Amino acid sequence: MDEARWTLLKSALDAQLHEIAQIFAKIEERQAHLDDPVHLESVGYQLHNLYSAFEDLFKIVADFFEHRITEHVGYHRELLWRMKIPIAGVRPALLSDESYKLLDSLRAFRHFFRHAYGTELDSKKIALVVEDALKLKKIYSQEFERFLEQLRP
């Protein structure tokens, strides 16, 4: 990959990673108050946003390397899965197995949250998803740095 393309990819990923960091900050700020229904809903919404922001990042990677995935049943699962596999001669894997599993948990929660009309959120279940999100927070930055270093010209 030439320097200009690498810089373009890095800039796009950095902008999206900034958005992700802001969402993580909101989750951390509000997680201590899951006993309050307003905070509980707010954290649920931010967890939804967190996975959506990661998915937007995955779309940047997929589009950049021209392996688009058309939207269909299973699209979200397939896009996430693609990020954990290296594509020989194209790009290294973006995600480790550990971050893939944590993100898959967030993906499942987002699906639930989007379709949970009239359902009360369970603070214990939200706390488990927050726990996964915070585990992810500890590892995702290094994985993205490793990904970019492997592509650096």
Image (cartoon, rainbow, N blue to C red):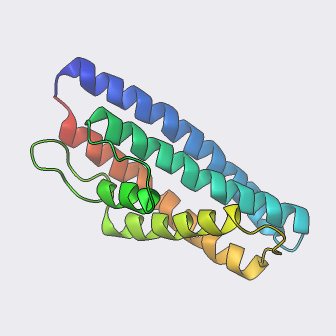
Residue 61 visible in rendering: yes
Residue 14, given in percent of the width and then of the height, sits at 45, 33
Quarter containing the N terminus: top left
Residue 93, given in percent of the width and then of the height, sits at 25, 53
Q: Is 32 situated left or right of 25 in this image? A: right
What residue appears at the point 58 percent right and 45 percent down from the top-left corner? Answer: 21
What residue appears at the point 17 percent right and 50 percent down from the top-left corner? Answer: 87
In-front residue for pair 28/20: 20
Q: Residue furthest front?
A: 72
**Where is 99 relative to 119, above or below?**
above
**Rendered image quadrant of residue 114:** bottom right
In-front residue for pair 26/49: 49
Q: Is 36 situated left or right of 109 in this image? A: right
What residue appears at the point 45 percent right and 42 percent down from the top-left corner? Answer: 57
**Rendered image quadrant of residue 5:** top left
**Where is 109 relative to 95, above or below?**
below
**Rendered image quadrant of residue 22:** top right
What residue appears at the point 67 percent right and 50 percent down from the top-left corner? Answer: 25
**Where is 85 relative to 101, above or below?**
above
Residue 139 visible in rendering: no
Q: Is 26 situated left or right of 59 in this image? A: right
**Where is 89 relative to 97, above or below?**
above
Quarter containing the C terminus: top left
In-front residue for pair 134/6: 6
Residue 17, given in percent of the width and then of the height, sits at 50, 40
